[in-house]
Image: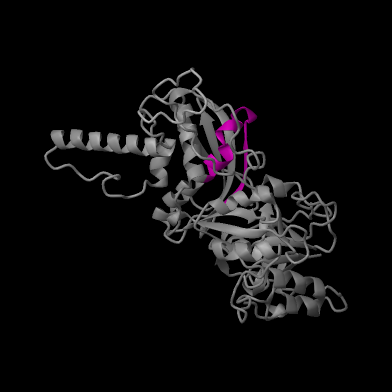
Amino acid sequence: MAAGGSYSIVEYFGGDDGYRCGYCKHENGNFSHGMWSHTMTVQDYQDLIDRGWRRSGKYVYKPIMNKTCCPQYTIRCHALNFHPSKTHKKTLKRVNKFLSKGEMPVERCDEGHEGEPMDSVHEEGVRPPPEDPLKIDHSEVQDIATSPDTDSTNSTAPTTPREDAAPASAEKTSSVTPKPGNGADPNRPQCRKAKDIRKERRLQKDQQKQQETVSSTPNPAPSKSQSNQPKSLEEFITESLPNDPLHRLEFKRFLCDSPLEAETAPDGPDVGYGSFHQQYWLDGRIVAVGVLDILPSCVSSVYLYYHPDFSSLSLGTYSALREIAFTRQLQQQSPKLAYYYLGFYVHSCPKMRYKGQYRPSDLLCPETYAWVPIERSIPRLEISAYSRLNENAQAGDALALKDLGRALVLHRRTVMPYAAYARKRKGLNDEKEVEQYASLVGQTCAERILLYRA
């Protein structure tokens, strides 16, 4: 139950039938368990995604990892320790160049995953609920302790990095064709790699700046380059932006409709917890919207959609970097909120492997629900699409179901443990279904979330 006294309420739909896979397009190879969430507390959803569940709107589903054609592993990035890769830096520079000078990239550099930013791929493979879920009036839900007619039972979501294009030479190359057989001109200096030339130029610029600083300041403070400290993500985001750029990119954040209940906590972030739309406004025109869930331990990226006119700016990558920076900002207000969840990592689908570039990151073991560094996980996934990632053979599910009777159900607007419900409904054979549900959500969630029973 949430701090405000509200429950999460779900209807479970099982998951025995296969359906179309949004990754490999197999017509009936995708298998998952699903449930409809009428309402969900942020702590319950945090615990569910840490057991491999994920939401698409109000539908919450969990892939059957050892049966589905393309196993989907929950992936999280350590936001505080994140350092942008070369590809990420290029994306930030590309966007900043557009904002400052108005230069739109000609070619699309993120082809392969920008067409499906974050988790739009899994959306088309998510099985909808088999029937319209029942509407429940939450205000009429009663606890078993205050209900007069119940038994008195205690309840307790890949870019291939490319080398920078070599700069054009300062000197014009000669159009005269050299005579055959003469070889290289010994009187001319040896050709050097463009990479070495760029390095030398940067060094000369750094030395020049250092000399200018020394001449103007008696005791200059050490710069980032002098102290050999790598630039932070936030510095790359704002780098090279003038005070009066040609284009202005603004960000607006609003609460949006979702099963997650908006909550605030004394030790939580100022914006509170819940589902938000992060809007990207370019010169007063909305160009992209990211859907984010802010949870007790993480920011979970749900979805991103953007205007196709700006696809060459790699907005999928840019928004992810912005969201990591936002997670770092929230962590300063709420220390335990330290992770950025990117949805599912699908190693068997090459265009979804780009999520592994946001490092350091972990994958969730599908058997023990322990987090395993992606560097240790990939060798196992190269051998088999499905793998128990936890290397400890003795480890098990710490939150495995131990007492089905303590799982909470909602029956006739009354909250009761399953043991009391089973006594009231003698002869009803739904124990197998309830046990499957409770095993998937784990003992802790089973004792907090209300499973609707007709």
Count of marks, rendered view? 0
In the picture, measured across the screen, residue 202 lies left or right of residue 313, that is: left
In the rendered image, the residue lying farthest to the right is 427
Magenta segment: 300-320
Residue 375 pos. (x, y %): 55, 62
Assign the N terminus to one quadrant of the image. bottom right
Q: Is any atom of residue 51 visible in this view?
A: no
Where 412 sits versus 251, above or below?
below
Q: Is residue 237 magenta?
A: no
Say which of 379 and 401 sits in front. 379
Residue at x 57% of width, y 63% of height: 2
In the picture, measured across the screen, residue 224 lies left or right of residue 212, that is: right
Residue at x 48% of width, y 23% of height: 102
Residue at x 55% of width, y 28% of height: 105
In the rendered image, the residue lying farthest to the front is 181
Residue 294 pos. (x, y %): 53, 52
